[in-house]
Amino acid sequence: MASATVDDLVMLELDANNSVSVSRHGATVTSWRHKGEEILFLSSKAVFDNVKAIRGGVPICFPQFGPWDLGPQHGFARTARWSVYHPPTSLDEGTITAILELNDQQTDNAWGYKFTLLYSITLTHTTLELKVGVENNSPKPFDFTILLHPYFSVSNVEAISVTGFENSHYFDKNKDGAKFVQKENEVKITSATDKIFPNVIGPHALLDPNKNRVVVIHKENFPDTVVWNPWTEGAKKMSDFGDDEFAHMVCVEPGFVSNRVCLEPNQEFNASMTLSVEMK
Ligand code: TA6
């Protein structure tokens, strides 16, 4: 059984209190320390065997968000071994960036297309930007869905709210995908939640009053947002997730999932999520 080693990690460090760790397994951002505080959630039962998707941080769902016929749900990007395209580099005293790459040569590519994924991670003292580019290197068009799946650490999921949803609608995966109207700006989590909000431009704000903290989520070219918390019942079904850990996390996931992205040969798709933290 493979196990994680030190060369699996790419570290971006501005100083002891501002850093990002990225596993080459799935190009999964596993930690973002902002002013000494960990912003992301990582399950205490997460498995680092370079096989299973890492439970927490920011997994990448590509070329399929959700179930698909060609492999495990959420696609192969989050369980493939990415290469370092550009090692961590300081652009100036307050900015460090790195780029990871995945292409069809590095995956058991049941999908069958030639592609290049470039994932750039840029850390400053105020923001973390995650930018993903997809290039069609095939002689024929292909289509996909794509989503960044951040797990945010929260004090108590029932105390937090997420804004940026006013006058929208969502499809509830816990109610057979039924469509519901969302009039309120904020979404609160009081039970198992798995909601796909199409065409919400954001930004979203994750308000955690107990931490006096707001995490702002800006999206570029990710028209949709998924909000997920497994709650008790969902937590029990995951071997890599503690039974009570649902109370200390929420996923607010920018994606292009309600429609498929179609790329012609040599065409590119680019999208990004930029996170910032405000202390209240
Ligand atoms: O983003 C929400 C979701 O699609 C949920 O339906 C749930 O399946 C979650 O992703 C986690 O999926 P995973 O395959 O990582 O267990």
Image (spheres, rainbow, N blue to C red):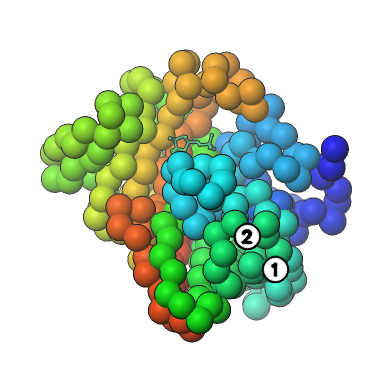
- Picture quadrant of residue 243: top right
Looking at the image, which is closer to me, 141 or 161?
A: 141
Q: How many marks?
A: 2
| Drawn side of residue 46 relative to residue 214, left or right | right
From where the camera sits, is residue 229 visible? yes
Q: Is 189 left, or right, of 117 in this rendering?
A: left
Residue highlighted by disc 2: 109
Query: Residue at image x 59%, y 52%?
Result: 76
Residue 66 placement (x, y as % from top left): 44, 43
User: Quick one: SS at disc 1?
Assistant: helix
Whether pointer 1 and pointer 2 mark residues with C-beta atoms closer than 8 Å, the reply is no
Q: Which residue is drawn at 51% across and 66% down?
A: 131
Residue closer to the observer: 89 or 149: 149
Residue 210 lies in quadrant: top left
Does residue 72 appear left or right of residue 257 in this picture?
right
Residue 32, position in %: x, y? 62, 49
Residue 28, placed above or below residue 163 = below
Say if disc 1 is inside 8 Å of ligand 1: no
Q: Is residue 85 left or right of residue 219?
A: right
Query: Mark 2 belongs to which amino acid?
Result: Asn
State the image coordinates of residue 143 (x, y, percent, origin top left). 41, 65
The residue pinned by badge 1 equals 105
Label 1, label 2: how far apart the Cα atoms are? 8 Å
Amino acid bearing label 1: Gln
Q: From this view, report whether residue 226 is shown above or below residue 141.
A: above
Q: Crowding at label 1, few (<14), some or many (≥20) Cα neighbours within 10 Å?
A: few
Does residue 19 appear in this view?
no
Q: Residue at position x 27%, y 34% from top? A: 177
How crowded is the residue under tag 2: few (<14 C-alpha within 10 Å), some, or many (20+)? Answer: some
Q: Quadrant of the C terminus?
A: top left
Figure quadrant of the N terminus? top right
